[in-house]
Image (spheres, grey):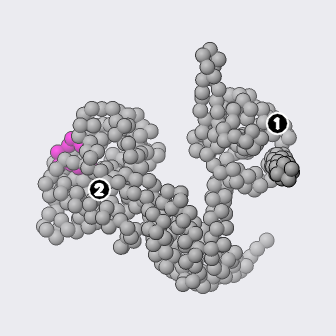
């Protein structure tokens, strides 16, 4: 049992710790959504977007911009800053008959959600769902006509709409590229977005040449950005230059996604608050990066999956260790998970139920399932590939006490592999001696 006084004391201690290592508002500066007033290494892209926006608006052109690049390369930040700059410059010139709207496409809302959000941004009280695309479109057209305004719409994370029916996102593209006094920006991670479009009318007006490519940040650029955030969030000397160098190299090697670096720095701050460290040097940063990778994914698996899902995932992991393969047959996994259920005193499941668990893991992005033909007249076979790091699955097994017997079984597999490797090394040494 603990008292409120005990809790108050612990909170006070953490506050004192934060004063020692962290600056006020430190978490804000490590949030991916934070937009610095003077962003580093994207001034050319911001300027280009701004000039295009001003050109479209001042000439009332029906045009579009494609902005593409890997996640975490500054696309959203650059558009939002260019939007702000364009609005200020145009209004200084006495041009105010325009509106620039920014919306983000979600993984679940689809085209209807994008259109309803646009209407809300325009001050139109519409239902979040239930209207047809044509009805949403009419509301936008009515706004342009009644308000006598030119409209530019930016749809961020456009890739999320590609899971919808093709005719829906193609209808949206057609509307945005064919409506008078309307232009658009589409922010995407897909370099080959045009390949997703089959409607010739859309392709003929989608300005794929008028595109801005955001190259991944280099190691030097990553270092500059992360050092600036460290200076904003942490007290001087808490995170050393060598630690920033290690993190910058890791982020650059993995594609330059700056959000990964910010996430690790946030993890550093939390580690300092918990009293686990008083500073972060090269060695500490290497350890934190490893912990961050394992804990982030492993904790997610442990906290979100049901016990039955975990058993199936553990079976996939065990098969991969046994076969030393990155992909395994679903039939083999079915047999191993059945054995795991027995050692946990759980009733067996049939193939249909097993397929449901596999489908849930696939939908959650934990595994990938592919059906492949065995050959003419020999039917199909399903292969499973794990999309999470092996260490994250091991972390999940270690954290859930109900899975202890399964962990013991898997540890025995790991021990056998170690013995095999040691034996091979011994034989190789003996061979060299002779």
Precedes in sequence: disc 1 or disc 2: 2
- The image position of residue 308, as x and y in percent, is 73, 41
Question: What is the quadrant of the N terminus in the image?
Answer: bottom right
Residue 266's place in the image compared with 211, above or below, is below
Residue 29's place in the image compared with 309, above or below, is below
Label placed on residue 339: 1
C-alpha distance separating marks 1 and 2: 56 Å
Q: Can residue 165 be seen by looking at this rendering? A: yes
Depth order, front residue of 238/105: 238
Query: Circles 1 and 2: CB distance less than 8 Å?
Result: no
- The image position of residue 193, as x and y in percent, is 37, 42
Q: On the picture, is 405 further left or further right than 78? A: right
- The image position of residue 341, as x and y in percent, is 80, 38
Residue at x-position 34% and y-position 62%: 78
Residue 138's place in the image compared with 228, above or below, is above
Mark 1: which secondary structure? helix
Residues packed near mark 1 inside 10 Å, few (<14), some (14 to 19) or many (20 plus) = some
- The image position of residue 294, as x and y in percent, is 66, 58
> Can you name the residue that lies furthest to the top here?
377
Residue at x-position 63% and y-position 82%: 17
Residue 233's place in the image compared with 211, above or below, is below
Location of residue 13 (image quadrant) = bottom right
Residue at x-position 62% and y-position 76%: 280
Q: Mark 2 — residue?
A: 101
Magenta residues span 176-184
Q: On the picture, is 139 further left or further right than 247? A: left
């Amino acid at each position: 049992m603990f008292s409120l006084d005990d809790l108050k004391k612990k909170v006070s201690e953490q506050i004192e710790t934060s004063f020692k290592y962290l600056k006020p508002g430190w978490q804000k500066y490590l949030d991916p959504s934070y937009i610095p007033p003077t962003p580093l290494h994207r001034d050319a892209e911001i300027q280009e977007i701004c000039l295009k926006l001003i050109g479209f608006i001042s000439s009332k052109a029906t045009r579009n911009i494609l902005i593409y690049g890997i996640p975490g390369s500054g696309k959203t930040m650059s558009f939002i800053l260019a939007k702000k700059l364009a609005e200020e410059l145009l209004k200084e010139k006495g041009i105010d008959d325009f509106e620039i709207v920014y919306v983000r496409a979600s993984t679940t809302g689809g085209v209807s959600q994008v259109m309803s959000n646009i209407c809300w941004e325009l001050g139109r009280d519409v239902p979040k769902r239930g209207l047809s695309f044509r009805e949403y479109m009419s509301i936008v057209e009515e706004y342009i006509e009644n308000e006598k305004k030119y409209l530019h719409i930016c749809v961020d994370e456009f890739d999320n709409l590609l899971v919808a029916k093709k005719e829906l996102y193609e209808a949206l593209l057609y509307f945005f590229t064919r409506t008078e006094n309307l232009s658009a920006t589409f922010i995407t991670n897909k370099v080959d977005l045009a390949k997703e479009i089959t409607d010739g009318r859309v392709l003929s007006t989608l300005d794929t040449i008028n595109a801005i490519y955001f190259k991944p940040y280099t190691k030097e650029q990553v270092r500059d950005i992360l050092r600036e955030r460290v200076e904003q969030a942490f007290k001087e000397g808490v995170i050393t230059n060598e630690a920033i160098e290690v993190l910058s190299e890791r982020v650059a090697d993995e594609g330059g996604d700056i959000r990964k670096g910010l996430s690790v720095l946030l993890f550093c701050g939390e580690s300092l608050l918990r009293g686990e460290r008083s500073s972060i040097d090269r060695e500490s940063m290497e350890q934190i990066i490893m912990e961050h990778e394992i804990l982030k994914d492993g904790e997610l698996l442990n906290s979100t999956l049901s016990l039955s899902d975990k058993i199936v995932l553990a079976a996939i992991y065990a098969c991969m260790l046994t076969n030393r393969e990155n992909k395994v047959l679903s039939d083999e996994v079915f047999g191993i998970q059945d054995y795991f259920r027995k050692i946990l005193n759980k009733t067996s499941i049939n193939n249909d139920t097993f397929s449901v668990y596999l489908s849930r893991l696939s939908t959650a992005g934990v595994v990938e399932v592919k059906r492949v033909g065995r050959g003419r007249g020999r039917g199909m076979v399903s292969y499973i590939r794990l999309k999470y790091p092996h260490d994250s699955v091991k972390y999940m097994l270690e954290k859930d006490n109900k899975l202890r017997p399964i962990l013991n079984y898997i540890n025995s597999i790991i021990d056998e592999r170690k013995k095999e490797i040691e034996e091979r090394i011994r034989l190789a040494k003996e061979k060299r001696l002779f």
